[in-house]
Image: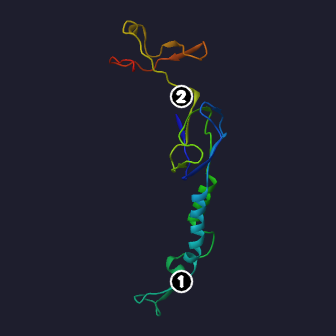
Amino acid sequence: MIFVSPDESGRVTKLAVREGDEVKPGVPLYSVDDDLQKADLNQNNATWPMRSRPMTVRRPWSKTGSGVRSQSRLRGVGAAGGGSPRQHFADAGWRRRNGFAPLAGTIQQIYFREGEMVPAQRPVLSIMPPGNMKLRFFVPETELPKLAIGDEVKVTCDNCAADLTAKIYFIATAAEYTRP
């Protein structure tokens, strides 16, 4: 499974796919609101002017005659210019609130629906690429010696194509039993 998650937390405002839908790379999957990103951006915009304003500080221990230096000179950096690094970070998060399919596959499960809050880095949905499909099956003990890793087997299932095959890549060394 490929899990698709937002970089920032927020409320799912739009879900553009349903479980079982086939998707291609770049197809929009969901949107997360930008309320938290806007709040963070507004807070940064409100506090940045105060942090960037030159301030004069008196340091009695300074070796210069008056002991007065501007904060920007103490830091060795100009106070003005370019906006805050946090503002650029918040702007980038704001732009990343839409989820797109990173690859082709089938939507397997949706974990968050419209209106629900999704934390950052938690998957909104999962995609199953065609090459990642695995099949687990049980073989009667009498048939087991006829099979080997790398063999192809014919697969049948309800509502599946008639000509499906699979390649064996693992055989358990201990007996396993079909789950109820």
Please, is residue 69 above or below residue 138 in the view?
below
The residue shown at (55%, 39%) is: 125
Amino acid under disc 1: Met
Residue 34 in view: yes
At 50% from the left and 46% from the top, the residue drawn is 122
Along the horizontal axis of the image, is 37 left or right of 67? right
Image vertical order of residue 122 relative to residue 105, above or below:
below
Q: Position of residue 171 (x, y in %)?
A: 40, 18
| Left or right: 83 in relation to 137 | right
Nearer-the-camera pick, 15 or 28? 15
Disc 1: which residue: 55
Q: Residues within 10 Å of mark 1 (few under 14, many from 20)?
A: few
For residue 153, which numbered disc appears in the image?
A: none
Give the spatial CA distance, label 1 vs label 2.
59 Å
What is the number of callouts on the image?
A: 2
The percent position of residue 131, horizontal first and vertical second, equals 56, 27
Q: Earlier in the sequence, mark 1 or mark 2?
A: 1
Give percent across and percent down for residue 96. Answer: 61, 51
Quadrant of the rendering where the C terminus is positioned: top left
**Residue 132 bears which disc, if any?**
2
The relative height of residue 136 versus residue 96 in the rendered view (above or below) is above
- Give the quadrant of residue 84: bottom right
* Closer to the camera in the image, 3 or 113: 113
Amino acid identity at mark 2? Asn
Q: Residues within 10 Å of mark 2 (few under 14, many from 20)?
A: few
- Give x and y (percent) for residue 46: 59, 72
Residue at 57% in and 68% down: 44
Helix, strand or loop for disc 2: helix
